[in-house]
Amino acid sequence: MIDCVENRLLTSRRGLLLGGASFAAWAYLPKFARAADGRDPRLVVVILRGALDGLSTVAPVGDPDYAGLHGSIALTAEGAHTALMLDSFFALHPSMPEFARMYRDQHAAVIHAVATPYRDRSHFDGQDVLESGYAGPGRVQSGWLNRALEALPRGERVSSGLAVGPTTPLVLRGNAPTVGWAPVALPQADDDTAMRLVDLYRHRDPALASALSQGLQLDKVASGDDMKPKPGNQVAQMRQVARGAAKLMAADDGPRIAALAFDGWDTHANEGGPVGRLAFLLGGLDGALAEFESGLGERWRDTAIVVATEFGRTARINGTDGTDHGTGTIALLAGGAVKGGRVISDWPGLKLANLYEGRDLKPTTDLRSVIKGVLQGQFGLSDRVLAETVFPDSASARPMKGLVA
Amino acid sequence: MARDSQAALVALNRFGFGARGGASGDLINAASDPRGFVKAELARPNGVLLEAPGLQSTPQLGQAVFAYQDQLKQAREAAKETAKAAAPAEAPQQAPTDPKPASRRNLSLNTVATEIAGQMTEAKPDTMQPNTAAPPAAKPAPQPLNVIQKTFRAEALARLQRATLAECGFTERLVVFWSNHFCISASKGELARIWAGAFEREAIRPHVLGRFADMLKAVEQHPAMLFFLDNQQSLGPDSRAGQNRKRGLNENLAREIMELHTLGVGGGYTQEDVTSLARIITGWTFAGRQGQLGTPGSFAFNANAHQPGAQMLLGKTYEATGLAQGEAALADIARHPSTANFVATKFVRHFVADDPPPALVARLRDVFVKTDGDLKALATALVDSDEAWKAPLTKMRSPYDFLVASGRLLARVPEDPGAYLSSLNLLGQPLWTPAGPNGFPDTSAAWAAPEGMKLRLDIAAQLGARLGNNIDPLDLLEFAAADAASIETRKTIERAESRQQALALLLMSPEMQRR
């Protein structure tokens, strides 16, 4: 009898997790925040952990140095798996057709050559800066999205900020209450983690390496080819996460602000070009954005999604067909509230002399300016609050104007 | 004395449950005096006993099961009566069923949450995860736990908390060792499940640093063991009960006493000896719900079921002294040279290596013989041996060890045993429920199997996803291994793409998996 209780608990380990208060927690975000035009704005922050290769996602195919630097994984505007031209200079990765459509409909935009103020190469610290909103990795236990939530006037009872996933990401942690939701089967070990572990075992513990590889192999055989969306794989999970979050946010009294994170962007080896590992992940991200669009329904009109990563990757391909930790990268905006159809960039160029430390796309735009622009456009937060509270000591990074329609 | 992190690793992992995270300073303490760190726990009087509010004695628990079973029976009978009475009448009028609300617009959050939650099982607060509360609106409330389930979970929790909080964990590891040596299985039935924790508390713990002969007697007279190996059904063929009921001997317990608990296979006993011991211990039972033999749920000697007469066992005659006949036999078996050898081998295999170093086994066997089975002396001799400190760390942590070590490193004291119990089920080591009376396997091959490793990784990834956000994996590596960590492990953790991933990799690292 108890066995069945325990089995139920077993499955629930992958089940619904609600953090903090109940769904109808004290609301910071007024419903119909923009009474003037009757809009009820929503904001989703998507964090890509592992440092996305912005030069492979939105490729500067018009830059004469791009193809040489990015080598075998460079995107091209011709041939099989053609990249999707966004303008005469930038082309989008072919595994993101939904984003391309949103872009054509002026509901998606790219900001290129962006970075947080962080200039070193540690994921942990880079993510700290990205999410805390402070200029350096200071171990602050609150995130900029939470502080933005706190700075909003209190209004009608809508739900608190929504943390999607097994825990609240730092960006949404803080004084303002949050709720959490995670879909079933979200926290499985992904391939990347498994491969890193196999690699460690190969060097330190061959017996465990062979046992684990066999175990993974069995699992693969049982679930078929891993590069197609199907229940349980990473692409399917990304869509599932987005679908659930969209559903919650679409409710009249649902959360207006959500944060989620997708892992796996640390492409040191076998990154792939128009097809391969990165393509697989970008397909998942593209699917997730489409799920938000369909799941939010009429609310999509009032929504802005910000996709950001802790830093970029080296401009030059490395010795294992991948890229190493870099600096400048992209941010993506999507949603009906976005004034899209543009790649916004003060393009630094990829000449050796123009690269940051001779290796990376040089950042010319502060990611905080982008995020501030979105927060201001959606919720009307003042320059002062943004510069002092949300992103402390960031007055020099002025909010980017006109990102939100 | 210089800090010796490698010795600290042995102290904490080979002998204990791994370093605790947070402010414990376990690794530093273990490094400055490795042997002293391990042996400190052996010196604590009554340190092995486990008493927690709400944990009850075996007779109390037995009565709780009997009462629960009576309750169910009454409820069933009442239901039968009601059904009989209601049968001729018309079925009660049903209210018109509401069609599913068609409107998809303006859904409220609770509706959405219910809908999403409806596809999932209900989440229980889970000790290994922070930040949880009940779901907003789950499926129909689950059945409340019955007394058996509640007891099992309370016993499990008390054991897990003790293991998590222990400084080194050596004595808790000894408890687990002896509990597995003298295992019962909770799957035997309701009594075994409710008694599993009490069995360990009452028959194992008081003797872990005492005498083997005392543990043996306590185990073989414990109602849980008598129930698990069917001795309460065994009747002396010539006893009064045996003649009346035309039933006879059950050799199960007698065989396992000699094969698994003392002499070991090839320990010099014959089928004759098994039968003889079975006869000797007839009448060893526990008092049933009627209480004719004593307090319900307590050990009892049923003279009516006991085979009369003297018995020959292992070349010695045991006179007909009733209960004392069996106690004398057990005392002798405990002292048998085969027992010393069997116990020493198993002990060294568990703590040192799958292929136990023969010299160490011989030394421990001699200690066992010389001290008349003093288990504290046995444990001390192990810690004092050089082999135990020099042998490479090649043993694979069992699932239980792995989960406890992870909980300790993450400095999370369990408040609910659910996550541990379900993970143990998943990893093939359900708590107190081995597949047979020989207990869970104790070799690396058994626990480093392909599917097991894959599942461990999944669990580590889940822990990483839930907890990685709030920790610095490199700090944890310092707590766990400091400079004894391999360069490769350190680099793998440093280069992980997120703290979550880094934590999963740390928990799976050889430093955490091997002991």
Image (cartoon, coloured by chain):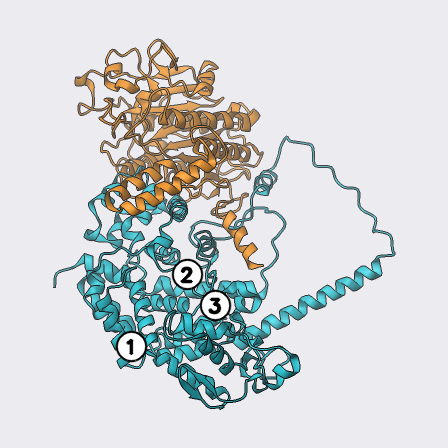
Chain colours: A orange, B cyan
- Chain of residue at mark 2: B
Numbered mark located on residue B368 in the image: 1
- Chain of residue at mark 3: B
Q: CA distance from mark 3 to mark 2?
A: 11 Å
The residue carrying pointer 1 sits among few (fewer than 14), some (14 to 19) or many (20 or more) residues within 10 Å by Cα, namely: many
Q: Which residue is mark 2?
A: B440
Mark found first going from the N terminus, 1 or 2: 1
* In the image, residue B461 above or below residue B346: above
Query: Split into 4 quadrants, where in the image is the N terminus of chain A?
Result: bottom right
Q: Residue B138, percent across and down?
A: 59, 47
User: Hey, what amino acid is under mark 1?
Assistant: Phe
User: Hey, what amino acid is under mark 3?
Assistant: Ile
Question: From the viewer's perspective, is A403 left or right of A325?
Answer: right
Q: What secondary structure is marked by label 1?
A: helix
Q: Which residue is mark 3?
A: B184
Q: Residue A326, percent across and down?
A: 25, 28
